[in-house]
Image: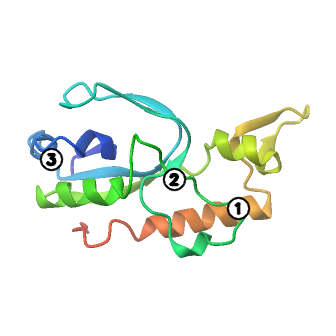
Amino acid sequence: MKASAFVYPWDVNGDPEAPARIAGLGVDQVTLAAAYHSTRALTPRHPRHRIVTAEHAAVLYPAGDRWDGRELRPYQAGGWAPGDAFGEAAAALTDAGLEVHTWVVLAHNSRLGAEHPGTSVVNAYGDRYPWAPCIAQPATRAYLIDLAAEAAVRPRGARHGA
């Protein structure tokens, strides 16, 4: 059995000691966030920040060409995970000898629901849940499938276990 840890890119990026510290925990692999919902996350050992606020659901890497011209597309992260934050963290973790796996949250996106209300779950009483994409909607389902497919090939060049 392999020991694993769930990690955000902002746990690693900007902290040159983080990959070795994580490997030193005795884990063999990490599951690294590639697409995540809004959150406020503690990073108590990071030298530059103690709390990270991800203001909305976002991909933590540059979205691919498959999204060009589409109404439903992933949002890019803000200053909390700029550029290819996922790729940068994945490379550092791989260099520390860790297997890197992708962590994607598909069904929690309040910004998508606020900007595209028709994508959200509606309960039996007609209440809309803007944070919950409704997979029964064909356009929403296509968006989520493509997001999962795009993330499934990440991290490129990383060492994967069996």
What amino acid type should be assigned to the residue bearing mark 1? Arg
Q: Is disc 3 placed on a helix, strand or loop? A: helix
Assess whether mark 2 and mark 1 are in contact (beta carbons under 8 angstroms). Answer: no
Q: Is disc 2 placed on a helix, strand or loop? A: loop
Viewer can see residue 141: yes
What amino acid type should be assigned to the residue bearing mark 2? Gln
Percent from the top left, x then y, of residue 25? 12, 39
Residue drawn at 43 percent across, 53 percent down: 60
Percent from the top left, x then y, of residue 21? 11, 40
Q: Which mark is residue 141?
A: 1
- Image depth: mark 1 or mark 2 in front: 2
Q: CA distance from mark 3 to mark 2?
A: 24 Å
Viewer can see residue 1: no
What amino acid type should be assigned to the residue bearing mark 3? Pro
User: Is 136 or 50 nearer to us in this picture?
Assistant: 50
Kindly identify which residue carries mark 3.
19
- Image depth: mark 3 or mark 1 in front: 3
Q: CA distance from mark 1 to mark 2?
A: 20 Å
The image shows a total of numbered marks equal to 3
Q: Earlier in the sequence, mark 1 or mark 2?
A: 2
Residue drawn at 68 percent across, 71 percent down: 69
Q: Quadrant of residue 14?
A: top left
